[in-house]
Amino acid sequence: MERKRYGKSVGDIMKVKSDFFTRNKEMLEMSSRQADALLRQPERKICKICHEPLGGDVFYHSQRMDYYLCGKCGHVNSKHEDTDDFANAVYITDSYENNYSEEDKKKYISRRDMIYIPKAQFLIEELEKDGLARDEISVLDDGAGSGYFVSALRKLGILNSTGVEISGPQVDFANAMNEEQILLQADPEKIVPIIRETKVNTVTFIGVLEHIINLDEILDAVRDNTNIRYIFFSVPMFSFSCIFEAAHQNCYNRHAGGTHSHLFQDSSIAYMADRIGFEKLSSWKFGSDMMDLYRMICVSLEEGGNGRLKEEFSERFLPILDTLQKTVDESESASEIHMILKRKA
């Protein structure tokens, strides 16, 4: 039976995502450019997860984008397909200098410890509960970005952990910050063979599955490699945040839209897991729905000339934000899920 955990303070998230409050106009313009890119792509004919033909009435509309609900698996699909052209248009590689300052490392470690250590602890604890000794855990992190999750695993003693990332500058940055080679750079066409051939027992995708163009190929590679016993991933869910975004068109749509062309539900995750021979082991739901609502109200009040009322709202709402969010999480309506899948016996 799936083990479930709910809730996490959003205070840390608000510190990291402060731009969403202070730079709404710029963020909204960026999102609009990303929507332009997606709207140029062919219309999506089949569900991203189960390949059921899409049709019928539009499920909802937000930031110029139509979304359809799959009648078979419950996945929420944008009207337009995510393609290689779309990926090339919206994914901008960060630039990192060759010389890194001590301040860079302090910020890196702070972000790792604040955001990624809890994720790594969750994975380790759940695998230990499933009978895997800590020194038996081995991890390949796909789409590892700047290596925060691999760095967190290594800090917690999972030394047989590494990551693969297509961005050379991010790989260089991660390795420099950790003063050792924790990530390997690989071109997109090399990722599937790497997954097929890895000897690790756990593959992780932290905020990655929703961005993968060739998702079926990646999942099939996991299915075919019997060394892989566990999958750990985080993905965006259809949630209250989607509704808040649709109702506040003048605010940056952090959750749906932008680079997220489809959203998961529990039913589509279950379908995806079963298709490749895995089942749900453990989940941790902690969303940002209430933070999104708080942000949108603050932005709307400020833009409407109600700065004093915004201050009053903040004083009353912030103390209860975590309590409200945990209620949302426990109702199975959170904007994000962290889940561990286990290969079926």
Image: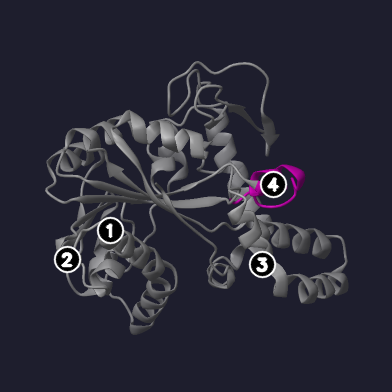
Q: Which mark, by number, is residue 127?
A: 1
Q: In which quarter of the image is residue 279?
A: top left
**Residue 264 appears in the picture as rendered:** no
Q: Name the residue under label 4.
A: 245
Region rendered in magenta = 240-254
**First in sequence: mark 1 or mark 2?**
1
**First in sequence: mark 2 or mark 4?**
2
**Residue 218 placed where, x, y %?**
28, 36
Question: What is the image's colouring?
Answer: one colour
* Nearest-to-viewer mark from 2 and 4: 4
Q: Name the residue under label 2.
A: 181
**Residue 247 appears in the picture as rendered:** yes
* Quarter occupied by the C terminus: top left
* Nearest-to-viewer mark from 4 and 3: 3
* Closer to the camera in the image, 79 or 39: 79
- Crowdedness near tag 1: few (<14), some (14–19) or many (≥20) residues, C-alpha within 10 Å: many
**Residue 15 placed where, x, y %?**
56, 72
Amino acid tagged 1:
Leu
Q: Which mark, by number, is residue 36?
A: none
**First in sequence: mark 2 or mark 3?**
2
Amino acid tagged 3:
Thr
> At x 58% / y 68%, what residue is drawn?
10
